[in-house]
Image (cartoon, rainbow, N blue to C red):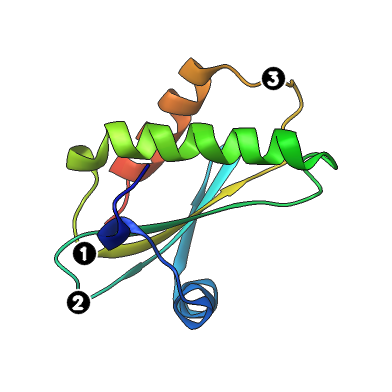
Amino acid sequence: MLKNIHRLRKSREIQRVFQKGKQTRSQNFIIRYLPSRNQVSRFAFVVGTKVDKRATRRNALKRQMREVVRKNLEKVPAGFDIIIIGNKIPNWPIEQKKIVDELGKLLLSLH
């Protein structure tokens, strides 16, 4: 579980990232990010019903994404508001190693 200081909670903060932020993507994930004045990076995770109609699978994917971010938090550049979006995933279940590889590359590419 991410600490509260690393979470984007308010809907207006999330909307600001969607409206004004930049985007980078991989095969299974999209990252929207916006520089902020905070000392730490904050995260929100989104997996829509296009990925899977079943809430249990969507929540499982969000838990996996959160865990990858939590374990690699020190590698993520500080001072960003980041939204990680799970895209349509062709092969379910997605392997943890693939999530780690893709999200790791995307998070390190933030500038």
Q: Quadrant of residue 94?
A: top right
Residue type at mark 1?
A: Gly
CA distance separating discs 3 and 2? 37 Å
Q: Amino acid at mark 3?
A: Pro
Residue 109 vertical placement versus 18 (above, below): above
How far separated are the C-alphas under marks 3 and 1?
Answer: 32 Å
Left or right: 95, with 75 as reference point? right
Residue at the (29%, 31%) spot, across then down: 71
User: Callout 3: 10 Å neighbours few (<14), some, many (20+)?
Assistant: few
Residue assigned mark 1: 79
Residue 100, how many percent across, how many down? 42, 26
**At which x and y percent is residue 87?**
67, 43
Q: Position of residue 103 (x, y in %)?
A: 43, 36
Please name the amino acid that badge 2 sits on.
Arg
Kindly give the residue lying farthest to the left in the view shown: 39
Residue at the (44%, 78%) spot, across then down: 13
Q: Residue furthest right?
A: 53
Please give the residue where the numbered disc 2 appears in the rendered image: 37
Q: Is residue 56 left or right of residue 31?
A: right
Residue density around tag 1, few if under 14, some if 14–19, many if 20 or more, within 10 Å? some
From the viewer's perspective, tell me whether residue 82 is left or right of residue 11.
left
Q: Name the residue carrying label 3.
A: 93
Residue at position x 50%, y 83% in the image: 12
Q: Of helix, strand and loop, which one carries label 2?
A: loop
Q: Quadrant of the N terminus?
A: top left
Q: Secondary structure at mark 3?
A: loop
Badges 1 and 2: C-beta atoms under 8 Å apart?
A: yes
Image position of 74 with respect to 45: above or below = above
